[in-house]
Image (cartoon, grey):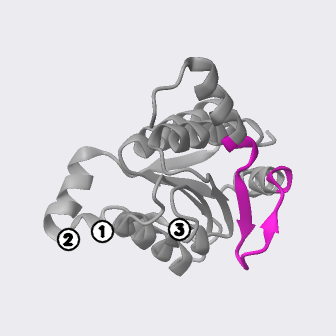
Amino acid sequence: MPQENVVEFFQTLSNLMLSIEVTDASGKALSLAEGGEQASEMLTEVKRSGHKIMLVGNGGSSAIVSHAHNDLCKSVGVRAMVFNEQPLLTAYANDDGYGSVFEQPIGMWGEHGDLLLTVSSSGKSENIVRAIQAAKGKDCQVITLSGFSPENPSRQMGDLNFYVNSNIFGYVESAHASLAHYITNSVKV
């Protein structure tokens, strides 16, 4: 990324955020407003029904889902879980490989009516893809946040998919963090 001044950075980030691409499970394009409304409705229904939201991400995306988890539990009052607790994560990684670290707990705790929110800059991490497959196997809805390649697997797998068209981590993660804030703030309590 060429050195930008702060105004250029925020202008680029703003443009990327306003051009987030949203698709549904069939690949149909939705406007950002429609996608935001659908995400809000999905999370609101999970709260109303007493189900839970599971959140997964790696690295910086793990920090984003941890923050969203905090907001969902504390501010929104919805049951939510993250699976980045080190002893469990390292036990699965050591015994079954890193690709299983989210798949295994989703297989254990995921239930029909739950929702999985994945955050992945690349959208192609094996453990994220396997988490989505595990959630689908439990009849959970899935919302994905991804970036980098428009053909990334996560973007093709969710019931609702948000894609940031950039291959620069800072932009993708900043857009994902803002989108996670919007989604959690929009849940009707």
In the rendered view, would you say 79 is above or below 155?
above
Q: Are marks 2 and 1 in contact (CB under 8 Å)?
A: yes
Q: Nearer the viewer, mark 3 or mark 2?
A: 3
Residue labelled with disc 3: 154
In the rendered view, would you say 154 is above or below 87?
below
**Is residue 140 in sight in this rendering?**
no
Residue 25 percent coordinates (x, y)? 70, 75
Q: Is residue 92 magenta?
A: no
At x 63%, y 35%, the residue is 13
Q: Nearer the viewer, mark 3 or mark 1?
A: 3
Q: Residues within 10 Å of mark 3 (few under 14, many from 20)?
A: many
Q: Is residue 30 magenta?
A: yes
**Which three-letter amino acid code belongs to the residue tagged 1?**
Ser
User: The C terminus lies in which quarter of the figure?
Assistant: top right
**Disc with the residue nearer the chain's start (3 vs 2):** 2
**Is residue 73 in sight in this rendering?**
yes
The numbered mark at residue 100 is 1
**On the rendered structure, is 123 left or right of 186?**
left
The residue tagged with tag 1: helix, strand or loop? helix
**Which three-letter amino acid code belongs to the residue tagged 2?**
Asp
The span from disc 2 to disc 1 (Cα, nearest Å) is 6 Å
